[in-house]
Amino acid sequence: MAAASMHGHNVNFSDVVNLTIALSERVAETWRQGRSVADTEVETIGNVASFLRLHLSEWPPQLSRAICNVITNSPKGRDRSLLLIEYIQSGAFDQQQSGKLTMPFVMDLYRIVLGREAEEDAVRHWSAQLNSGKITRKQLLGTVITSDEFRASLSVA
C-alpha cells in the first residue's frame, strides 16, 4: 500500500491498516471476555472506518467484524449511531444482508439500526412492502435511518 500526504503529514496506509487490525482484535477480545468496549475505542473505530472508507477500496475484514460487534452489542448512543452510518456507507451492511429473506432482513434492520426488536406488525408490513416491490431494501434502510427514532440516537450523549 502506498503512502499519501494529508494535512502536511505522510500517511502510510499499511501502518493504518495494521493499527486498525490490532484495534479490531482488541475489541473482539473485549467482547469475548464479556466486557464493554470503551467509548473512546468505539469513537476511534468510527474515525478509522471513516478514514479508510475515504482512502481505500475495502476495509480489513477484522474491522467489519469489530464494527458488527460494537453495533450489535453496544447500547444506543451517538458513537454507535455514527459507527453504524460508516458501516452502511461502506457497503458492508448490504453485503451482510444480501442473501437474507425479507422477514429476517427487517428484523435485523431494526435490531442493528434502531438497537431494538421490531414489532410483529412492523415486520409484516415492511416484509409485504419489500415482497411486493413497493419499496427496495435500500429505500427501507433510508426510511429507518432518517426516522425520528434513529435521529434521536444521534443526539444521545
Image (spheres, grey):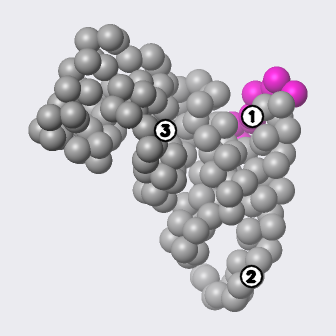
Q: Nearer the viewer, residue 18 or 157?
A: 18
Q: Position of residue 117 (x, y in %)?
A: 44, 16
The quarter of the rendered structure image containing the N terminus is bottom right
Q: Which residue is mark 2?
A: 12
Q: Is residue 155 left or right of residue 132?
A: right
Label ID, residue 37: 1
Magenta span main SS: loop
Mark 1 surroundings: few (<14), some (14-19) or many (≥20) residues within 10 A:
some
Q: Is residue 123 above or below residue 144?
A: above
Q: Are marks 2 and 1 in contact (CB under 8 Å)?
A: no
Q: Which residues are magenta?
A: 33-40
Residue 155 visible here: no
Q: Is residue 50 above or below residue 87?
A: below
Q: Is residue 88 above or below residue 135?
A: below
Q: Which residue is mark 3?
A: 81
| Residues at marks 3 and 2, CA–CA distance in whole angstroms | 28 Å
